């Protein structure tokens, strides 16, 4: 009910606005804002949440509009079917761009989408038979229910083929916007939204939890493209005329500006941003209004800057540049004669200003101010779920065939340039055991971990897990087979809560797809509830139940390591790789850790343990393998390894070994 | 066959221009993992400044050829200054405040501003750039080549060679390479890495400005000339690999030739399509580029 109320209020507002705003000009302006807001909200998924930059959203928007155009021009298919077809078409184009461009990290998506944007505009101009080229496409207002296609067969249906009134189309656009906000809210609150946040905090941990960074970035971009296409149809029918020039590079940049200026990672920000970019041309068309606005901005800057300089003398140097810029901007506006000539310059300066002095956008800025006044408003929603018994933390113990090795590493070589980090190492791990992997620093232990989890692809050799060959598989695939790990330098999702960290690991338990989530179907809700219950049980198991709603980055170091183990357990692994879990832990913590590792083994999970604390290794490992300079130098039970002269030599040097 | 050879030759000269711009992207990407999204505008500004300078020199009754040579240092210095300015205003600040992707938006914004200013200074119409070499084509075997096309190829190779030699031989070049390899380590060894990054931007814009005056005599000059060239060079940089100088040349040649062939055998309207197609193909098959080396993740 609490969720429903704002939606109802918004719907009521949309229904009332046409009565309040009677000027068709302003109603059309509001309608354009609503349509642009849909694109900007979609762009925020990519730009705000996954941190990738798209400079091609105007082109995707245009493809949506032209899908409607082509359908209406060539097939006489109207508004409603276009509304379904256009998102599908733009999503396909989105996939075409995202699938190759997101394979590499870096500014590739920005570069590819920029190229795409320009080329789409050229193509729309060129493919005249399909798009009518530079002449553009005309539309007529859609009918509320378009029965015309059937009116020959069923003449009585023609009666309802009335053209929509402007106010009706406005209401429709407004409702579409509300619908989009609801859907985006649901997606971002779901496992997808969590994955988007997680992949920015630690892409490697995300991949190793079976949550493919690549896949989720592609999903974000494709969804974003679909929203742009959806908005494109509304735009086409709202303007009733589209031409290639509508969808230029500048519009793409405007969309980015709207997201940044309004405030990323919020729903309100894109709305504000869309309103600004729609109203911007009006502001820039009226020189006297522009001068007034520039004057007000300069005055505010001088007052705010002055106040902060008096309060905090250290900030003087930092404050003086933006204040001077604002004043210079005002002086510039007084000299400006023909504003249209310098429209793009002003636009560029706005972008620079926003990037430097308003990086969190208007919403972020306001939030900061309000958070200082009323901090309680911005606390996290406390969600408490009671966990069950310890056994709830684990699924039914995997069936263990004691004699068949779970993991079989055969002569694995890992070479970095001239350096052989692993020089043909064999390793056999029996199921249900704790297998220690020790050796001096630089002996290749962590490299082995990275080979086992697909972060490195071995130069030669073979890795068999159960019946699967792991060599060549990517981290998420290996995780899906049941190999989980922790990291030597902790790789938590710092801005997610403890529960959410574990939920990322539980991603594999979700059965519902993105459409079920968007529609809020029961299965999607059930998945989430079930996963939260297990997350609570897992946190209970690692002893962190009391901190479930804390952000992971606020945990002390030792507890961060325990959380990593919990998150790895969420994967329901058959094999758990622990990379120096005791590093940095206090003595009581270590004792607790030993207990936890034993319990994990008792639940049927095989453990490989890398550790420098020899008391830990010697007390709990069933078998120990010793590496030195990328070679296996010893293997056996704790006592055997301890007595092995080669091991002593590796740790203490040759002279010490002979002295003993 | 003659036509084909002729197309190859024109493709090579276009491709070398792309290569020089792409080379500029590589310079800054190596040191700072950022690049100038307004590189096309750096090229355009270089060409227009060159145009004003050469017209002034010709007005002093200096021959076109000598005027062109005298103009070059002016344009190169302007390019250096423009690049340093972009880095100072667009990149350094954005990196300092840890604004994610802020540098992308800032360099785009600067590009837009430069283009708009150029429109106001030089007008919106394309202008003719005086050619320092005779415009009559030479007949070499089966193909006709404009002397300026030969100059483009020679000039482009000379510039890239000069920068490479500088990087390999001089101590300052070593600082550039060190910063490219590991910025933190270079910083700890006393290299002023932020100066190195500024310098790489200056060099990058210098290459673009140089490309601008190379290409200007065979095309027209104007505020709008940069955008598409900058974009094509993106494709070239990705096709060849963002880390490989040879990649830029090979990528440039591939794209230049494929475009010219498409323009002739299919339609000039579709001349710009192969760039995107090749870009997507290379990213699908070998994401680090034809000559790039995949980076090793560190955990």
Image (cartoon, coloured by chain):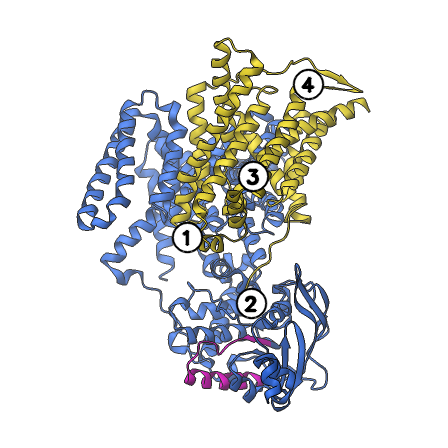
Q: Residue at x 43, y 82 (%)?
A: A589
Q: Are marks 2 and 4 in contact (CB under 8 Å)?
A: no
Q: Position of residue A163 (x, y in %)?
A: 48, 33
Q: Mark 2 and 1 residues: CB-CB less than 8 Å, in contact?
A: no
Residue nearest the observer in this picture, A209 or A521:
A209
Mark 2 to mark 4 CA distance (whole Å)? 60 Å
Q: Which residues are magenta?
A: A576-601
Label 4 sits on residue? B146
Q: Nearer the viewer, residue A402 or B6?
A: B6
| Callout 4: chain | B
Q: Which mark is residue A216?
A: none
Judge whether B121 appears above or below A630 on screen: above
User: Circle 4 — which element?
Assistant: loop
Vertical order, A263 against B133 (above or below): below
Instruction: Please give the residue where the numbered disc 1 appears in the rendered image.
Output: A265
Q: Nearer the viewer, mark 1 or mark 3?
A: 3
State the SS at label 3.
helix
Tell me which label, 2 or 1, sits earlier in the chain.
2
- Name which of mark 3 and mark 4 comes first in the sequence: 4
Residue A474 seen in the figure: yes
Chain A's shade in the image?
A: blue
Q: Colour of chain B?
A: yellow
Name the secondary structure under disc 2: loop
Q: Secondary structure at mark 1?
A: loop
Q: Answer yes or no: do the residues labelled 3 and 4 have beta carbons within 8 Å?
A: no
Label 3 vs label 4, nearer the camera: 3
């Amino acid at each position: 009910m609490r969720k429903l109320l704002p939606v109802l209020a918004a719907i009521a507002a949309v229904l009332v606005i046409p009565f309040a705003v009677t000027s068709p000009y302003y109603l059309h302006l509001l309608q354009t804002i609503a349509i642009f807001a849909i694109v900007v909200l979609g762009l925020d998924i990519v730009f705000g949440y996954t941190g990738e930059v798209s400079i091609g959203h105007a082109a995707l928007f245009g493809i949506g509009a032209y899908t409607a155009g082509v359908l209406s021009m060539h097939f006489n298919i109207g508004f409603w079917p276009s509304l379904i077809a256009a998102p599908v078409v733009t999503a396909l184009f989105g996939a075409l761009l995202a699938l190759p461009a997101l394979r590499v990290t870096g500014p590739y998506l920005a570069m590819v989408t920029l190229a795409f944007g320009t080329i789409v505009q050229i193509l729309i101009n060129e493919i005249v038979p399909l798009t009518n080229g530079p002449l553009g496409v005309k539309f007529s207002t859609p009918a509320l229910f378009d029965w015309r296609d059937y009116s020959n067969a069923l003449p009585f249906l023609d009666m309802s083929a009335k053209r929509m009134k402007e106010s009706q189309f406005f209401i429709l656009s407004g409702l579409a916007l509300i619908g989009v906000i609801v859907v985006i809210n649901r997606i971002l609150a779901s496992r997808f939204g969590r994955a988007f946040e997680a992949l920015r905090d630690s892409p490697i941990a995300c991949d190793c939890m079976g949550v493919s960074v690549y896949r989720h970035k592609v999903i974000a971009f494709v969804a974003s493209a679909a929203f742009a296409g959806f908005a494109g149809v509304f735009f086409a029918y709202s303007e009733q005329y589209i031409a290639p020039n509508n969808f230029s590079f500048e519009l793409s940049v405007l969309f980015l500006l709207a997201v940044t200026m309004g405030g990323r990672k919020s729903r309100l920000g894109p709305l504000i941003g869309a309103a600004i970019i729609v109203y911007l041309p009006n502001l820039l068309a009226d020189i006297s209004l522009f001068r007034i606005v520039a004057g007000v901005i300069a005055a505010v800057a001088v007052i705010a800057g002055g106040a902060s300089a008096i309060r905090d003398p250290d900030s003087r140097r930092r404050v003086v540049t933006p204040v001077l810029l604002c004043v210079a901007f005002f002086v510039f506006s007084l000299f400006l004669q023909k504003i249209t000539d310098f429209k793009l310059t002003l636009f560029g300066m706005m972008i620079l200003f926003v990037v430097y002095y308003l990086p969190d956008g208007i919403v972020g800025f306001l939030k900061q101010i309000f958070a200082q006044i009323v901090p309680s408003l911005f606390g996290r929603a406390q969600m408490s779920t009671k966990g069950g018994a310890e056994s709830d933390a684990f699924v039914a113990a995997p069936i263990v065939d004691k004699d068949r090795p779970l993991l079989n590493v055969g002569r694995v070589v890992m070479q970095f340039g001239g350096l052989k980090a692993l020089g043909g190492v064999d390793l056999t791990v029996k199921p249900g055991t704790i297998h220690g992997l020790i050796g001096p620093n630089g002996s290749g232990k962590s490299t082995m971990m990275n080979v086992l989890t697909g972060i490195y692809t071995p130069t030669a050799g073979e890795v068999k897990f159960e019946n699967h060959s792991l060599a060549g598989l990517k981290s998420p695939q290996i995780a899906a087979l049941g190999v989980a790990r922790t990291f030597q330098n902790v790789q938590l999702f710092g801005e997610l809560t403890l529960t959410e960290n574990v939920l990322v690991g539980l991603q594999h338990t979700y059965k519902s797809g993105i459409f079920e989530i968007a529609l809020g179907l029961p299965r999607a809700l059930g998945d989430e509830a079930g996963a939260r219950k297990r997350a609570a049980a897992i946190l209970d198991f690692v002893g962190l139940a009391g901190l479930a709603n804390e952000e992971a980055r606020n945990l002390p170091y030792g507890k961060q390591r325990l959380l990593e183990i919990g998150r790895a357990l969420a994967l329901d692994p058959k094999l758990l790789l622990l990379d120096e879990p005791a590093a940095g832990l206090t003595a009581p913590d270590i004792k607790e850790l030993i207990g936890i590792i034993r319990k994990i083994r008792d639940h049927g999970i095989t453990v490989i343990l890398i550790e420098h604390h020899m008391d830990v290794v010697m007390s709990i490992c069933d078998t120990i393998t010793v590496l030195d300079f990328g070679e296996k130098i010893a293997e056996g039970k704790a006592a055997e390894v301890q007595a092995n002269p080669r091991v002593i030599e590796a740790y203490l040097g040759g002279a010490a070994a002979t002295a003993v | 066959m003659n036509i084909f050879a002729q197309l190859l030759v024109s493709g090579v000269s276009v491709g070398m221009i792309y290569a020089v711009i792409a080379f500029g992207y590589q310079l800054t990407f190596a040191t700072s993992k950022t690049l100038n999204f307004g590189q096309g505008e750096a090229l355009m500004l270089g060409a227009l400044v060159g145009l004003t300078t050469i017209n002034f020199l010709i007005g002093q009754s200096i021959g076109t050829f000598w005027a062109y040579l005298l103009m070059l240092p002016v344009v190169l210095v302007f390019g250096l200054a423009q690049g340093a300015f972009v880095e100072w205003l667009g990149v350094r600040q954005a990196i300092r405040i840890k604004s994610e992707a802020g540098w992308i938006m800032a360099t785009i914004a600067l590009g837009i501003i430069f283009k708009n200013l150029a429109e106001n200074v030089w007008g919106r119409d394309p202008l003719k750039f005086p050619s320092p070499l005779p415009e009559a084509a030479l007949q070499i075997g089966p193909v006709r080549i404009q002397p300026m096309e030969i100059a483009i190829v020679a000039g482009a190779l000379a510039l890239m060679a000069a920068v490479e030699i500088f990087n390999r031989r001089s101590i300052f070049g070593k600082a550039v390479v060190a910063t490219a390899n590991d910025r933190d380590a270079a910083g700890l060894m006393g290299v002023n890495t932020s100066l190195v990054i500024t310098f790489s931007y200056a060099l990058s814009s210098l290459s673009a400005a140089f490309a601008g005056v190379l290409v200007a005599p065979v095309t027209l000059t104007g505020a709008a000339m940069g955008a598409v060239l900058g974009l094509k060079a993106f494709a070239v940089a990705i096709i060849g690999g963002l880390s490989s100088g040879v990649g830029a040349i090979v990528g440039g040649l591939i794209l230049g030739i494929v475009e010219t062939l498409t323009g002739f055998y299919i339609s000039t309207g579709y001349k710009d399509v192969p760039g995107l197609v090749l870009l997507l193909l290379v990213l699908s098959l070998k994401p680090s580029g034809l000559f790039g080396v995949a980076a090793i993740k560190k955990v």
